[in-house]
Image: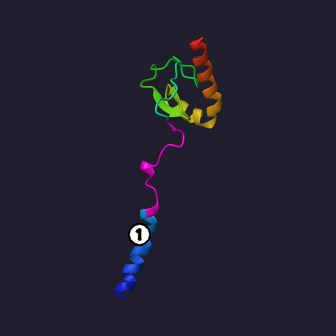
Amino acid sequence: MKKLKTLIAIALAVPFLLSPIPSLAEDTNSVAPVNPKPDLLANCPVSGDKLGEMGKSVVFVYQGQEVKLCCPDCKKDFDKDPAKYLSKIRSADEKAKN
């Protein structure tokens, strides 16, 4: 009986030990190289508002590109269509280089 209880305890503990801890799971949007491409925009690519007007900007790396947004709500919109906003950031960065 004692062996059976031990086996049951082990069987119940194994799935918990093998599952990832959600707070430690990596953000799937952040594939960050050593030096991400900088976001040179002064305005949020989602809302068009000036960065910093609504408090601290939301800054993260998405597929090697630094992204600066004005607020967490814009992050939700960015996540719906990241390609649209990345193109805005990259075209502005290209204009700044020329």
Q: Give the residue displayed 64% in from the left and 34% down from the top.
A: 81
46 or 35: nearer the eye? 35
Q: Give the residue displayed 52% in from the left and 28% down from the top.
A: 67
88 on left or right of 18: right
15 on left or right of 97: left
Where does label 1 land, which residue? 13
Residue closest to the far top: 98
* 41 shown above or below 72: above
- Where in the figure is residue 79, as x and y percent of width and height? 58, 36
Main SS class of the magenta portion in the image: loop
Q: Which quadrant is the C terminus positioned in?
A: top right
Count neighbours of disc 1 (C-alpha within 10 A) and say few if under 14, some if 14 to 19, many if 20 or more. few
- Where in the figure is residue 63, as x and y percent of width and height? 56, 35
- Where in the figure is residue 31, as x and y percent of width and height? 52, 38
Q: Give the residue displayed 37% in from the left and 82% down from the top.
A: 5
Read off the magenta span.
Answer: 18-32
Q: Give the residue displayed 50% in from the left and 23% down from the top.
A: 38
Residue 23 on the magenta segment: yes
* 98 shown above or below 91: above
